[in-house]
Amino acid sequence: MLGGYWQKLLKIDLTSNKVWTETILEEDLRKYIGGSGLAAKILTEECSQETNPLGAENVLIFMTGPFTGTNVITSGRHAVVAKSPLTGIWGESDVGGYWGAELKKTGHDGIVIYGAASSPVYLWVDEKNIEIRDASDLWGKDCFSATESIQAATSDTAQVACIGIAGEKMVKFASIMSDGRDARAAGRSGMGAVMGSKNLKAVAVKGTLKGTTVDPKKLLDINKSIAPTISERTKGMNNFGTGGALAAIEHAGGLPIKNWSKGVWETGAEKISGVAMTNSILHKTFHCKSCIIGCGRVTKVDEGKYTTGITAGPEYETLAMLGSLCMIDDLKAINYANYLCNLYGMDTITTGSVIAFAMEAFEKGIITMDNSDGLELSWGNADAAIELIHRIAAREGVGDLLAEGSRAAASRIGKGSEEFAIHVKGLELPAHDPRAWVSLGVGYATSNRGACHLQAFSHGFEKTVTMKDLGYPQALDRFAPQGKGELVAKTQNLMAMFDALKLCKFLCFGGIDLSIITAWVEAVTGWDCSSEELLETGERLFNLKRLFNVACGVSCRDDVLPQRIRFQRRGEGGTPDNLPPLEEMLNEYYAVRGWTKEGLPSSAKISALGLEDVATSLGID
């Protein structure tokens, strides 16, 4: 008996209106697991270097993992994968909430969407029927109202993943929003733009089927043994959300300030922190499916020009990118900006980054009142930032330029703006500074989707995270480069496994270790596996995604950091002088990975991981 899976993949061609299902072989599940791992196998089979990310030939993949829909702690997650329109390479977004578990209840492990509809449609999926429905009356609606309209037409308890006008307009960093006004976002890499290019407004799912767990008693016993520790170690997140650490991160010198150019912002950080939110606009907390941490925020602002009512509150990344990065210290304004991003369906990290880019270009006279549609894009101008969000989502005026992302915007306007477009491979940096935690430097440089702290999560091991069975019994020196290439390779493998099984990375702060994850796998699936096998599988998945990028032209030339991060010191605060020694860490990383000096997986490594056929199909020798 195989638990955790239906072994059933739903496939839909929007061009031909064809719907069919395929059986997923157990050998493929064992090799690629699920989530972004199994999706990587599919993407490498269906797309190539020539695939236009916004063309009908791109595929859009929604995928659960074996843990999704079970009682495994923090397993309420699913992945969305396609070739990214923002970066032109591997695109992946991971999202929590309830949508993935509901899809699992329909009897499907994932959905692969081909082609493009001739007019707007949405999908309605339950365990008995799969329908492609007209969405002409939904086109132009925001994410919240579209969700509510679809629920009225299907089931008021249906879970809906949908795009807003940003996705319809194919803003390159448009997100796919689920969980209605609780607003869980598949934010990064522009998956919402891919959805919009297919004329697909939403995917609504509703099921009643119960998945199988091979040994439910064992699973219950594991959870009982570790739940108290996880809850205790993550109670700060429950109390104050992910933004609870914002002031401490500023003190350590890791908070991005003024487009990564400034070192200190103590008073501002305190004003926009999770603690300040709890003491002012917090309404309640939000828990994803099967989560005992509850880091999600629900806020309430009922008066003033930043009125939102009850809505999903900003997380750490949003507070930093729409706050400190732009020098905005008004918490209600940031909360409103976050509300708009959720309403329109846009990634708050890239949105904040392109706004900060525009503000610096305005400061330098590259963007002026004449070509900014009359907006005074000065630092800290919250109202101008909010107006930019409206214009980016609608692709109006200067918003049309910024909707392409900072790399493309800088390439278009020139005049030295490339120096302050802060991205790796086209994906803007998240709100964690490699000058404060050096492992982030090599992590950002080598992450398969571009700058990403979650594909390695190595900086956690430079803070408080320990994991004895990974070789890290104590937290590491955050400034020391020695061993950081190896750390990032190991944690990337670990996180690739998290993303395949569907686990939240915050479990690491809760004291989780490999033995627990292995026991969960055995209890859910019935497989007899080891921690070593899981890590090797994670290594296979990371290399598989790298091979896709290699086929798209990625090499060591692209494993870089922005010049500002690499060579400009913060000058003050908790990290005044440190710079990430990228070359040293990268050389170690390539050696540990078994890659060539050009950053390509070696033939020996490809063979050892059983990826020869994939490499051949991608045209890689």
Image (cartoon, rainbow, N blue to C red):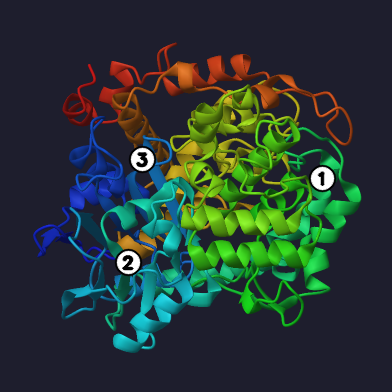
Q: Is residue 13 left or right of residue 31?
A: left
Q: Earlier in the sequence, mark 2 or mark 3?
A: 2
Q: Quick one: 620 or 450, which is closer to the camera?
A: 450
Q: Is residue 182 left or right of residue 379?
A: left
Nearest to the eye among marks 2 and 3: give it. Answer: 2
Q: Earlier in the sequence, mark 1 or mark 2?
A: 2
Query: Mark on residue 537?
Result: 3
Residue 256 x %, y %: 73, 41
Q: Amino acid at mark 1?
A: Glu
- When the figure is inspected, residue 372 is found, relative to residue 319, above or below; the finding is above
What is the spatial separation of the Cα atoms under label 3 and label 1, in whole angstroms? Answer: 36 Å
Q: Amino acid at mark 3?
A: Thr
According to the image, label 2 marks what residue? 201
Nearest to the eye among marks 3 and 1: give it. Answer: 1
Crowd tier of the residue under label 1, counting other residues whose Cα lies within 10 Å: few below 14, some 14–19, many 20 or above? many
- When the figure is inspected, residue 148 is found, relative to residue 578, above or below; the finding is below
Query: Mark on residue 250?
Result: 1
Query: Mark on residue 186?
Result: none
What is the spatial separation of the Cα atoms under label 2 and label 3, in whole angstroms? Answer: 34 Å
Residue contact between numbered discs 1 and 2, judged by CB atoms under 8 Å: no
Q: Amino acid at mark 2?
A: Lys
Crowd tier of the residue under label 3, counting other residues whose Cα lies within 10 Å: few below 14, some 14–19, many 20 or above? many
What is the spatial separation of the Cα atoms under label 1 and label 2, in whole angstroms? Answer: 39 Å
Residue 68 x %, y %: 39, 65
Check disc 1 and report its element: helix, strand or loop.
helix
Residue 348 visible in the snapshot: yes
